[in-house]
Image (tube, rainbow, N blue to C red):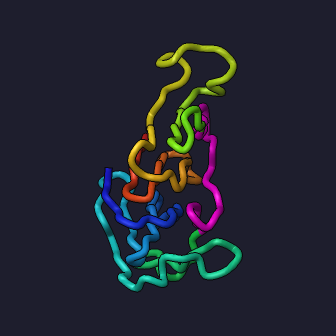
């Protein structure tokens, strides 16, 4: 878990074959390596955290400074909900506290918890902003108003 106060949204980019996560907050932008969790770049300009246009993209920073990054979060947008063999679902059985489920298919068509699906996150203390996979499918992010949680695979 990486604390990010005032988180507005997240978006994936790649650099040299690795997944990077652009995080927008009320305090600007941060770029994170999804494997190590280390922050690679920061733009402290508060207005840079909001998508520039109706296309819901933000200008990249650091090694992705020349690219626009599609964002998902408070302003809208979305992330990939499936990848090779896996899917992620957001459910709200005790709204407004949302839960994130990871499954090998669908958690609604059979199989027991821990066999074909797993409850991986419960937003008890912060509002869920986005949940989904990177385009490569190697990284899963769950972003709330106060932090990001990352899972990666080879």
Write down the quadrant of residue 79 in the picture. Answer: bottom right
Q: Residue at x 39, y 54 (%)?
A: 148
Residue 84: x percent and y percent?
61, 37
Q: Is 47 displayed left or right of 77 in the figure? A: left
Q: Is residue 75 magenta?
A: yes
In the rendered structure, which segment of residues is drawn in magenta?
70-90
Q: 5 or 51: nearer the eye? A: 5
Above or below for 77 versus 1:
below
Q: Is residue 102 visible?
A: yes
Percent position (x, y) of residue 101?
54, 33
Task: Tell me the residue at 47%/59% (across/down).
Answer: 17
Residue 130 location in percent, x, y? 54, 53
Q: Which residue is depicted at the point 48% across and 84% down? A: 47
The residue at 61%/67% (across/down) is 75
Picture quarter with the C terminus: top left
| Residue 9 left/right relative to 25 | right
Asked whether 39 or 95 is in front, the reply is: 95
Image coordinates for residue 4, horizontal then vertical, percent: 35, 63
């Amino acid at each position: 878990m990486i604390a990010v106060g005032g988180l507005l949204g997240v978006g994936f980019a790649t650099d040299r074959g690795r997944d990077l996560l652009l995080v927008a907050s009320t305090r600007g932008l941060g770029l994170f390596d999804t494997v190590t969790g280390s922050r690679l770049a920061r733009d402290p300009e508060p207005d840079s955290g909001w998508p520039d246009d109706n296309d819901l993209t933000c200008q990249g920073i650091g090694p992705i400074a020349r690219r626009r990054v599609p964002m998902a979060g408070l302003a809208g947008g979305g992330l990939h909900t499936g990848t090779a063999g896996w899917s992620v679902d957001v459910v709200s059985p005790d709204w407004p506290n949302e839960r994130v489920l990871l499954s090998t298919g669908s958690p609604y068509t059979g199989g027991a918890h821990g066999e074909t699906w797993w409850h991986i996150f419960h937003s008890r203390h912060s509002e869920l902003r986005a949940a989904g996979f990177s385009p490569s499918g190697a990284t899963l992010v769950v972003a709330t108003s106060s932090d990001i949680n990352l899972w990666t695979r080879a």
